[in-house]
Amino acid sequence: MADALRTGLMTRRFAPGQRLIEADLTEEFQVSRGTLRQAFSRLESDGLIDIVPNRGAIVRQMSQRDVLELFQIRSELEGLAARLAASRMSDPAVKARFKADIAAIWEEQPRVDGGRYLDENSGFHQAILVAADNQQLASICGQFHLHMIMGQVGRALGGEAMARSVEEHRHIADAILECDPDRADRLMREHLLRALQLSQA
C-alpha cells in the first residue's frame, strides 16, 4: 500500500499540498483503514506526507529553499558516489554488477510514462551508490528524500526532459565504466544542477 501511494507521489498523481482522503483511497485500493493508516505512518516517517490533526494526511509541500538546499547536498554526495564507483570499476565483478543494474538506461524506446521513468531514474542513482560501496554514504543519501524531490519536479518531466536526462545518465555511466572519477563526479554534478533548474522552472 505504501509503495502504491509513493508511486502516486512521485508521478504527481497526488500533488504537493493535496489532502489524501481515507475513504476514497480505501475504496480505490480495496484495503482497510488500518492498512491505509499503516501506509500513511510509513510515508510520514519518510518525510513524504504530514499527518495534521483534524485534517488527516497531506502531501508534503517543499519550499523552493527546501528543494535548493537538498539538491546542493545531493550534488556533493552523489558526485562523491560517482567518483567512488568509477574508482572501483577495475574489479570485474563490480563492473559486471553495475552494468546489469543500469541496463535500463540503454533501452532505446522513448520515455513517455513518468512513473516508469522515475523508477528507472531511481534505479540508476541507486546502482551508483551500490557500486560506490560506502554504506555510510548510501545511508546519508537515503535521508534526503529523493522521491519527494522528484515529486516536486514531476511537472517538468515531459518527453524532452526525460530524453535529455537519459542521455546524461549514459554519459555518467560511460565515465564510471571507463574508470574516470573526475569526469564521473563532474557529470553527476552537472546532471543534478539541471534537475534543480527544472524544479524551479
Image (cartoon, grey):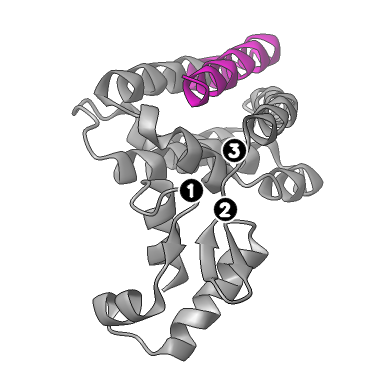
Q: In which quarter of the view is residue 47 placed?
A: bottom right
Question: Range of the magenta residues?
Answer: 173-201
Q: Look at label 1 and name its amino acid.
A: Pro
**Membership of 198 in magenta stretch:** yes
The numbered mark at residue 168 is none
Q: CA distance from mark 3 to mark 2?
A: 37 Å
Q: Is residue 107 visible?
A: yes
Whole-percent x, y for residue 30 in the image = 27, 84
Q: Earlier in the sequence, mark 3 or mark 2?
A: 2
Whole-percent x, y for residue 82 in the image = 65, 26
Front residue of 89/150: it is: 150
Q: Residue at x 41, y 49 (%)?
A: 15
Residue placed under numbered mark 1 in the picture: 16
Q: Is disc 3 in contact with disc 1, using a CB cutoff of under 8 Å?
A: no
Q: Residue furthest right?
A: 136
Whole-percent x, y for residue 194 in the image = 52, 16
Q: Is disc 1 in contact with disc 2, using a CB cutoff of under 8 Å?
A: yes
The numbered mark at residue 60 is 2
Q: Is 9 displayed left or right of 98 in the figure?
A: left
Nearer the camera: disc 3 or disc 1: 1
Q: In which quarter of the view is residue 75 placed?
A: top right
Front residue of 185/56: it is: 56
Q: Look at label 3 and name its amino acid.
A: Val
- At mark 2, the secondary structure is loop
Residue placed under numbered mark 3 in the picture: 94
Q: Residue at x 59, y 71 (%)?
A: 42
Front residue of 84/144: it is: 144
Q: Residue at x 67, y 17 (%)?
A: 185
Nearer the camera: disc 3 or disc 2: 2
Whole-percent x, y for residue 13 in the image = 33, 51
